[in-house]
Image (tube, rainbow, N blue to C red):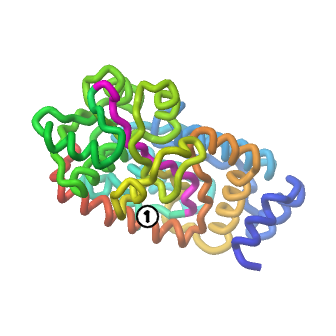
Amino acid sequence: MKRRDLVAKAVLLTPAVFVRTARAQDNWPSRPVTIVVPFTPGGSSDIVARTMAQNIQQALGRPIVVENRPGAGGEIGARVVARTAPDGYTLMHAPISTWAINVPLRPNLGYDPVTQLSRIMQTVRTPNVLVVNPEKIPATDLAGVVEWLKRNSRTASYSSSGIGSSDQLTAEMFKQATGTDITHVPYSGGAPATTALLTGDVQLSFQNLGSITPQIAAGRARPIMITSDQRSPLLPNVPTAAEAGLQDFVVYSWQGLGGPAGITGPLLESINLAAAASLRQRETASRFAEMGFEVVASSASEFAAFQEGEIARWRRVIQAGGITAD
Protein backbone atom coordinates (compact mmCIF):
# COMPACT_ATOMS: atom_id res chain seq x y z
CA MET A 1 0.00 0.00 0.00
CA LYS A 2 1.31 3.46 -0.91
CA ARG A 3 2.08 5.79 1.99
CA ARG A 4 -0.53 8.33 0.88
CA ASP A 5 -3.21 5.64 0.98
CA LEU A 6 -1.92 4.42 4.35
CA VAL A 7 -2.23 7.88 5.87
CA ALA A 8 -5.69 8.36 4.39
CA LYS A 9 -6.73 5.02 5.86
CA ALA A 10 -5.25 5.88 9.25
CA VAL A 11 -7.44 8.98 9.50
CA LEU A 12 -10.52 6.78 9.29
CA LEU A 13 -9.39 4.19 11.82
CA THR A 14 -10.94 3.95 15.25
CA PRO A 15 -8.46 4.58 18.10
CA ALA A 16 -8.25 0.86 18.91
CA VAL A 17 -7.50 -0.15 15.32
CA PHE A 18 -5.08 2.78 14.95
CA VAL A 19 -3.17 1.57 18.02
CA ARG A 20 -2.69 -1.87 16.49
CA THR A 21 -1.67 -0.36 13.13
CA ALA A 22 0.97 1.92 14.64
CA ARG A 23 2.39 -0.57 17.13
CA ALA A 24 2.55 -3.35 14.60
CA GLN A 25 5.51 -1.58 13.01
CA ASP A 26 7.89 -1.41 15.98
CA ASN A 27 5.87 -1.24 19.23
CA TRP A 28 6.13 2.57 19.44
CA PRO A 29 5.20 4.08 21.82
CA SER A 30 5.58 1.80 24.81
CA ARG A 31 6.17 4.68 27.26
CA PRO A 32 5.59 8.48 27.44
CA VAL A 33 6.82 10.67 24.57
CA THR A 34 8.08 14.24 24.97
CA ILE A 35 7.69 16.83 22.21
CA VAL A 36 10.04 19.75 22.78
CA VAL A 37 8.91 23.16 21.54
CA PRO A 38 11.93 25.52 21.58
CA PHE A 39 9.78 28.60 22.25
CA THR A 40 7.49 29.87 24.99
CA PRO A 41 3.93 28.53 25.41
CA GLY A 42 1.12 30.10 23.42
CA GLY A 43 2.84 30.55 20.06
CA SER A 44 1.63 28.83 16.92
CA SER A 45 4.27 26.08 17.02
CA ASP A 46 3.25 25.37 20.63
CA ILE A 47 -0.47 25.31 19.76
CA VAL A 48 0.06 22.90 16.87
CA ALA A 49 2.31 20.68 18.98
CA ARG A 50 -0.20 20.47 21.83
CA THR A 51 -3.08 19.70 19.49
CA MET A 52 -1.05 17.00 17.78
CA ALA A 53 0.08 15.57 21.13
CA GLN A 54 -3.47 15.40 22.46
CA ASN A 55 -4.74 13.63 19.34
CA ILE A 56 -1.90 11.10 19.31
CA GLN A 57 -2.33 10.42 23.02
CA GLN A 58 -6.03 9.76 22.57
CA ALA A 59 -5.37 7.43 19.65
CA LEU A 60 -2.42 5.48 21.04
CA GLY A 61 -3.15 5.54 24.75
CA ARG A 62 0.28 6.73 25.83
CA PRO A 63 1.15 10.10 27.43
CA ILE A 64 2.47 12.64 24.91
CA VAL A 65 3.96 15.60 26.81
CA VAL A 66 4.83 18.99 25.32
CA GLU A 67 7.85 20.61 26.97
CA ASN A 68 8.79 24.24 26.22
CA ARG A 69 12.54 24.91 26.06
CA PRO A 70 12.76 28.54 24.88
CA GLY A 71 15.87 30.62 24.35
CA ALA A 72 18.40 31.79 21.77
CA GLY A 73 15.89 31.84 18.93
CA GLY A 74 15.08 28.16 19.29
CA GLU A 75 18.69 27.01 19.62
CA ILE A 76 18.47 25.82 23.23
CA GLY A 77 15.59 23.44 22.64
CA ALA A 78 17.04 22.16 19.36
CA ARG A 79 20.38 21.39 21.04
CA VAL A 80 18.60 19.45 23.79
CA VAL A 81 16.80 17.31 21.22
CA ALA A 82 19.90 16.78 19.08
CA ARG A 83 21.70 15.25 22.07
CA THR A 84 19.04 12.68 22.97
CA ALA A 85 18.79 9.05 21.91
CA PRO A 86 17.06 8.43 18.55
CA ASP A 87 14.46 6.14 20.11
CA GLY A 88 11.36 8.18 19.26
CA TYR A 89 10.69 9.32 22.83
CA THR A 90 12.09 12.84 22.48
CA LEU A 91 10.82 14.80 19.48
CA MET A 92 10.76 18.47 18.49
CA HIS A 93 8.11 20.63 16.89
CA ALA A 94 9.49 23.95 15.67
CA PRO A 95 8.97 26.70 13.09
CA ILE A 96 10.85 27.64 9.93
CA SER A 97 13.45 29.65 11.87
CA THR A 98 14.67 26.62 13.86
CA TRP A 99 14.62 24.28 10.88
CA ALA A 100 15.99 26.55 8.14
CA ILE A 101 16.51 30.30 8.62
CA ASN A 102 18.90 30.03 11.57
CA VAL A 103 21.44 28.11 9.48
CA PRO A 104 22.49 30.98 7.17
CA LEU A 105 21.52 33.70 9.66
CA ARG A 106 23.66 32.49 12.58
CA PRO A 107 27.06 31.14 11.47
CA ASN A 108 27.89 29.93 14.99
CA LEU A 109 24.67 28.01 15.43
CA GLY A 110 25.02 25.31 18.09
CA TYR A 111 23.16 22.61 16.16
CA ASP A 112 22.81 21.45 12.56
CA PRO A 113 19.18 20.73 11.59
CA VAL A 114 20.34 18.66 8.61
CA THR A 115 22.93 16.36 10.18
CA GLN A 116 21.96 16.41 13.87
CA LEU A 117 18.19 16.13 13.57
CA SER A 118 15.84 13.65 11.92
CA ARG A 119 13.29 15.33 9.66
CA ILE A 120 9.97 13.55 10.28
CA MET A 121 7.30 15.80 8.80
CA GLN A 122 6.41 19.28 7.66
CA THR A 123 3.25 19.69 9.72
CA VAL A 124 1.50 22.93 8.77
CA ARG A 125 2.12 26.11 6.80
CA THR A 126 0.62 29.58 6.44
CA PRO A 127 1.28 32.31 3.89
CA ASN A 128 2.13 35.92 4.60
CA VAL A 129 0.01 38.85 3.50
CA LEU A 130 1.44 42.16 2.31
CA VAL A 131 -0.61 44.79 4.13
CA VAL A 132 -0.36 48.56 4.13
CA ASN A 133 -1.69 51.27 6.39
CA PRO A 134 -4.45 52.77 4.20
CA GLU A 135 -3.90 56.24 5.68
CA LYS A 136 -0.19 56.17 4.79
CA ILE A 137 -0.18 54.42 1.41
CA PRO A 138 -3.13 55.29 -0.86
CA ALA A 139 -2.35 52.54 -3.39
CA THR A 140 -4.71 49.59 -3.65
CA ASP A 141 -2.64 47.23 -5.83
CA LEU A 142 0.94 46.01 -6.06
CA ALA A 143 1.96 48.29 -8.91
CA GLY A 144 0.73 51.30 -6.96
CA VAL A 145 2.53 50.21 -3.80
CA VAL A 146 5.82 49.71 -5.64
CA GLU A 147 5.47 53.11 -7.30
CA TRP A 148 4.78 54.72 -3.91
CA LEU A 149 7.78 53.00 -2.34
CA LYS A 150 10.11 54.20 -5.06
CA ARG A 151 8.87 57.77 -4.64
CA ASN A 152 9.22 57.60 -0.84
CA SER A 153 12.33 55.47 -0.40
CA ARG A 154 13.82 57.82 2.22
CA THR A 155 10.90 57.46 4.61
CA ALA A 156 9.35 54.10 3.73
CA SER A 157 9.57 51.46 6.47
CA TYR A 158 8.16 48.05 7.30
CA SER A 159 7.69 46.21 10.59
CA SER A 160 8.55 42.61 11.38
CA SER A 161 8.31 40.25 14.33
CA GLY A 162 12.09 40.26 14.70
CA ILE A 163 15.42 39.91 12.94
CA GLY A 164 15.54 36.68 10.98
CA SER A 165 11.78 36.15 11.19
CA SER A 166 9.80 34.81 8.25
CA ASP A 167 8.06 38.15 7.80
CA GLN A 168 11.34 40.07 7.72
CA LEU A 169 12.87 37.74 5.15
CA THR A 170 9.70 37.86 3.06
CA ALA A 171 9.96 41.66 3.05
CA GLU A 172 13.66 41.50 2.15
CA MET A 173 12.86 39.11 -0.68
CA PHE A 174 10.18 41.59 -1.79
CA LYS A 175 12.70 44.44 -1.78
CA GLN A 176 15.11 42.43 -3.91
CA ALA A 177 12.37 41.38 -6.34
CA THR A 178 10.94 44.89 -6.79
CA GLY A 179 14.09 46.99 -6.54
CA THR A 180 12.68 49.02 -3.65
CA ASP A 181 14.43 50.37 -0.58
CA ILE A 182 12.46 50.03 2.64
CA THR A 183 13.80 50.48 6.17
CA HIS A 184 13.34 47.49 8.46
CA VAL A 185 11.91 48.14 11.93
CA PRO A 186 12.03 44.91 13.98
CA TYR A 187 9.75 44.24 16.96
CA SER A 188 9.57 41.47 19.54
CA GLY A 189 6.72 39.57 17.93
CA GLY A 190 3.91 39.75 15.43
CA ALA A 191 1.51 41.64 17.72
CA PRO A 192 3.72 44.72 18.25
CA ALA A 193 4.73 44.62 14.58
CA THR A 194 1.07 44.79 13.60
CA THR A 195 0.43 47.57 16.12
CA ALA A 196 3.23 49.60 14.53
CA LEU A 197 1.50 49.24 11.17
CA LEU A 198 -1.91 50.21 12.51
CA THR A 199 -0.61 53.30 14.32
CA GLY A 200 1.33 54.45 11.27
CA ASP A 201 4.79 54.07 12.79
CA VAL A 202 5.53 52.04 9.65
CA GLN A 203 3.65 52.01 6.37
CA LEU A 204 3.60 48.31 5.48
CA SER A 205 4.31 44.82 6.71
CA PHE A 206 4.17 41.15 5.77
CA GLN A 207 2.17 39.29 8.41
CA ASN A 208 0.90 35.73 8.80
CA LEU A 209 -2.53 35.20 7.31
CA GLY A 210 -4.36 34.21 10.50
CA SER A 211 -2.98 37.00 12.66
CA ILE A 212 -3.68 39.88 10.25
CA THR A 213 -7.12 38.79 8.97
CA PRO A 214 -9.08 40.51 11.83
CA GLN A 215 -7.34 43.82 11.12
CA ILE A 216 -8.13 43.49 7.43
CA ALA A 217 -11.78 42.74 8.19
CA ALA A 218 -11.92 45.85 10.39
CA GLY A 219 -10.52 47.99 7.58
CA ARG A 220 -7.46 48.98 9.60
CA ALA A 221 -5.03 47.23 7.25
CA ARG A 222 -5.33 47.02 3.47
CA PRO A 223 -4.25 43.71 1.88
CA ILE A 224 -2.29 43.97 -1.35
CA MET A 225 -1.32 40.36 -2.06
CA ILE A 226 -0.91 36.98 -0.41
CA THR A 227 2.23 34.86 -0.76
CA SER A 228 0.48 31.51 -1.21
CA ASP A 229 0.29 29.69 -4.53
CA GLN A 230 -3.52 29.98 -4.47
CA ARG A 231 -5.97 32.46 -3.00
CA SER A 232 -7.05 31.85 0.58
CA PRO A 233 -10.65 31.13 1.58
CA LEU A 234 -10.08 33.60 4.43
CA LEU A 235 -9.26 36.38 1.93
CA PRO A 236 -10.85 35.29 -1.35
CA ASN A 237 -10.62 38.75 -2.92
CA VAL A 238 -6.90 39.18 -2.27
CA PRO A 239 -4.72 38.17 -5.24
CA THR A 240 -1.68 35.92 -5.02
CA ALA A 241 1.68 37.53 -5.72
CA ALA A 242 1.66 36.02 -9.21
CA GLU A 243 -1.81 37.43 -9.90
CA ALA A 244 -0.67 40.81 -8.58
CA GLY A 245 2.26 40.81 -11.01
CA LEU A 246 5.14 39.42 -8.93
CA GLN A 247 6.29 36.05 -10.24
CA ASP A 248 8.18 33.36 -8.30
CA PHE A 249 7.10 34.78 -4.97
CA VAL A 250 5.47 31.89 -3.14
CA VAL A 251 6.39 32.04 0.56
CA TYR A 252 5.05 30.13 3.53
CA SER A 253 5.84 30.28 7.22
CA TRP A 254 5.91 26.59 8.10
CA GLN A 255 6.48 24.21 10.98
CA GLY A 256 8.05 20.79 11.23
CA LEU A 257 8.28 17.73 13.47
CA GLY A 258 11.59 16.00 14.02
CA GLY A 259 13.89 14.36 16.51
CA PRO A 260 17.55 13.50 17.05
CA ALA A 261 19.49 12.16 14.08
CA GLY A 262 19.26 8.41 13.63
CA ILE A 263 15.50 7.80 13.74
CA THR A 264 15.07 5.53 10.76
CA GLY A 265 13.00 2.80 9.19
CA PRO A 266 9.79 1.52 10.80
CA LEU A 267 10.14 3.83 13.81
CA LEU A 268 10.30 6.94 11.62
CA GLU A 269 7.28 5.70 9.68
CA SER A 270 5.34 4.98 12.88
CA ILE A 271 5.86 8.51 14.19
CA ASN A 272 5.06 10.04 10.81
CA LEU A 273 1.88 7.99 10.48
CA ALA A 274 0.66 8.90 13.97
CA ALA A 275 1.36 12.62 13.42
CA ALA A 276 -0.29 12.64 10.00
CA ALA A 277 -3.43 10.96 11.31
CA SER A 278 -3.64 13.41 14.21
CA LEU A 279 -3.29 16.46 11.95
CA ARG A 280 -5.77 15.22 9.35
CA GLN A 281 -8.60 14.72 11.81
CA ARG A 282 -11.51 16.75 10.45
CA GLU A 283 -11.97 18.95 13.53
CA THR A 284 -8.25 19.60 13.83
CA ALA A 285 -7.79 20.51 10.16
CA SER A 286 -10.83 22.78 10.34
CA ARG A 287 -9.54 24.52 13.45
CA PHE A 288 -6.15 25.11 11.87
CA ALA A 289 -7.80 26.43 8.69
CA GLU A 290 -9.62 29.04 10.77
CA MET A 291 -6.21 30.07 12.14
CA GLY A 292 -4.85 30.43 8.61
CA PHE A 293 -2.87 27.18 8.65
CA GLU A 294 -2.94 24.48 6.01
CA VAL A 295 -2.17 20.92 7.11
CA VAL A 296 0.74 19.56 5.04
CA ALA A 297 1.54 16.24 6.80
CA SER A 298 4.36 15.43 4.38
CA SER A 299 6.47 12.30 4.26
CA ALA A 300 9.87 12.34 5.95
CA SER A 301 11.71 12.35 2.63
CA GLU A 302 9.55 15.19 1.31
CA PHE A 303 10.25 17.22 4.42
CA ALA A 304 14.01 16.66 4.24
CA ALA A 305 14.17 17.75 0.60
CA PHE A 306 11.92 20.75 1.24
CA GLN A 307 13.87 21.86 4.31
CA GLU A 308 17.23 21.77 2.54
CA GLY A 309 15.72 23.74 -0.33
CA GLU A 310 14.46 26.34 2.14
CA ILE A 311 17.90 26.67 3.73
CA ALA A 312 19.41 27.37 0.30
CA ARG A 313 16.65 29.80 -0.61
CA TRP A 314 16.90 31.91 2.52
CA ARG A 315 20.69 31.83 2.39
CA ARG A 316 20.48 33.63 -0.95
CA VAL A 317 18.10 36.24 0.46
CA ILE A 318 20.15 36.74 3.63
CA GLN A 319 23.43 37.10 1.76
CA ALA A 320 21.97 39.44 -0.85
CA GLY A 321 20.45 41.63 1.86
CA GLY A 322 23.49 41.57 4.14
CA ILE A 323 21.27 40.45 7.01
CA THR A 324 22.83 39.46 10.33
CA ALA A 325 21.41 38.27 13.64
CA ASP A 326 23.17 41.09 15.51
Q: Main secondary structure of the magenta part?
A: strand
Q: Nearer the viewer, residue 31 or 310?
A: 310
> Is residue 126 found inside the magenta-colored segment of the image?
yes
> Is residue 272 found inside the magenta-colored segment of the image?
no
Q: Nearer the viewer, residue 141 or 194?
A: 141
Examine the rendering and report whether any part of residue 326 can be seen. Answer: no
Q: Nearer the viewer, residue 102 or 19?
A: 102
Q: Position of residue 27 (x, y in %)?
A: 76, 64
Q: Position of residue 290 (x, y in %)?
A: 63, 39
Residue projecting furthest to the top = 199
In which quarter of the view is residue 185 placed?
A: top left
Residue at 27% across, 54% down: 173
Q: Pick the quarter of the image with the C terminus.
A: top left
Q: Nearer the viewer, residue 133 or 78?
A: 133
Residue marked by disc 1 = 307
Residue at 62% across, 53% down: 295
Say above or below: 15 vs 209: below
Q: Position of residue 228 (x, y in %)?
A: 47, 54
Q: Pick the quarter of the image with the N terminus.
A: bottom right
Examine the rendering and report whether any part of residue 58 can be seen. Answer: yes
Identity, as a three-letter code, of the amino acid under mark 1: Gln
**Which region shows up in magenta?**
120-135
